[in-house]
Image (cartoon, helix red, strand yellow):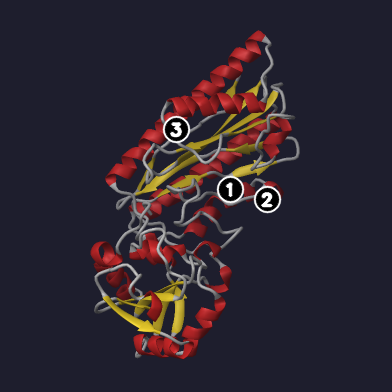
Amino acid sequence: MARGGCDVIGDRLEQVQAALRAAAVDGWLLFDFRGTNPFAARIAGLPPGGLLTRRWFLYVPAHGEPHVTVHAIERRSFPDLGMRVESYGSRTELVDALGTTLAGVRRTAMEFSPNGNIPYVSRVDAGTVDLVRGLGVEVVSSADLLQLFLEWSDVQLADHGRAARALTEVKDVALAAVREHAASGTPLTEYELQQHMARALDERGMKYEHAPIVAFGETTSDPHYTPSEAGSRPLAPGAILLDLFCRAGADDSPYADITWMAHLGPPSDAFLETFDRVRAARDAAVEFLRARLSAGAEVRGYEVDHAARAVLIAAGLEPYLLHRTGHSLGTDAVHGDAAHFDGIETLDERLVLPRLGFTVEPGVYRPDFGVRSELNVVATATGLDVTTAVQGAVDVL
């Protein structure tokens, strides 16, 4: 979702209402209290910094015009969304107003996930869900509705491509630095290589949440290892993991995110075999996605995870699997708000929708080394595009 959000009335109303009707849902009840549901403000198109201290609701029916319910003292301060605004004073009046809004409604979507399967979208507190249910309305998840506001524009797709190319260049810069230091025998720590890569990203005008992940040897076994200036490992024969991510300069540019494996000196058979298994799992997930999307079939995030995980489990590697297969790519952060390829940490039942970007990054983490291989894909209306470099073999340095 681009910063600043979208106006659901001006930009997406017809699309949202069509999706509601297709799902046999009568409406979408967006709710916020003091920023507890950031999706509500972003979808409504509310500007940041407004004086909203009481509960407010935006109801989008499957048919008809949306309207807002706000506290009486904030009716004037609530931004003009070009729709009908109703106010309440007491809690009793709020319940009455919701009862009027939801009269005749059987099912409404909210930022809620049954059984907490998708915690990323669980933004409405249990008490408010109870309140709506107490009015005789079934509450269903708005998870896929939210994704309609995350689709990348043509400009964002181009920006993602720029970021992907920058990552390939910086990955090559890092590998060249390792070769140079190994050949000359001059010391190089994980932290020093990380900072070298960060400077290379800066030189290309890229932005990022934090500097790349660089791991040598046993630290590759920690998926979220980050080297520190004091105590990071020196370069020595063994595994090298580079995880780097960035976005182009614009605030709403989406991230690209890759992980690349190298090895200083001859790798062991176990290391090469593990890489081959991880690569096969990565490619199985990509081909599963491509086949389903090309056929016009639905695919959900957890299914992609299962496709990759099945390859690794069949190879006897289940004890070394520590995380999901991939995540959506965001703009504010590298981990986005759309579907994740996750059927183990969570059960992500969201659809993989066109014009959204994702990582595919299975990993195996043995006690002595870890292997992860990561590329990016963008779903399209007719299939799948791989948008980053694809590692076919370990870079032996």
Could you tell me the amino acid type at mark 3?
Ala
Tell me: 365 left or right of 248: right
* Image quadrant containing the C terminus: top right
Could you tell me the amino acid type at mark 2?
Glu
Disc 1 element: helix
Read off the residue under disc 3.
Answer: 389
Disc 3 element: loop
Mark 3, other Cα within 10 Å: few <14 / some 14–19 / many ≥20: some
Find the distance from the CA under tag 2 to the CA under tag 1.
Answer: 10 Å
The first of marks 2 and 3 along the sequence is 2
Tell me: 81 left or right of 240: left
Taking depth in this image into account, of 150 and 322 the one nearest to the observer is 150
- Note whether 106 is above or below 357 in the view shown: below
Image spot of residue 166 (x, y percent): 43, 30
- Mark 2 and 1 residues: CB-CB less than 8 Å, in contact? no
Image spot of residue 196 (x, y percent): 56, 23
* Image quadrant containing the N terminus: bottom left
Read off the residue under disc 1.
Answer: 311
Residue 116 occupies quadrant: bottom right
Find the distance from the CA under tag 2 to the CA under tag 3.
Answer: 27 Å
- Note whether 96 is above or below 139 in the view shown: below
| Labels 2, 3: front one | 3
Image spot of residue 369 (x, y percent): 70, 35
Find the distance from the CA under tag 3 to the CA under tag 1.
Answer: 22 Å
- Note whether 196 is above or below 284 in the view shown: above
Mark identifier at residue 318: 2
Taking depth in this image into account, of 46 and 53 the one nearest to the observer is 53
- Note whether 232 is above or below 1 in the view shown: above
The first of marks 3 and 1 along the sequence is 1
Mark 1, other Cα within 10 Å: few <14 / some 14–19 / many ≥20: many
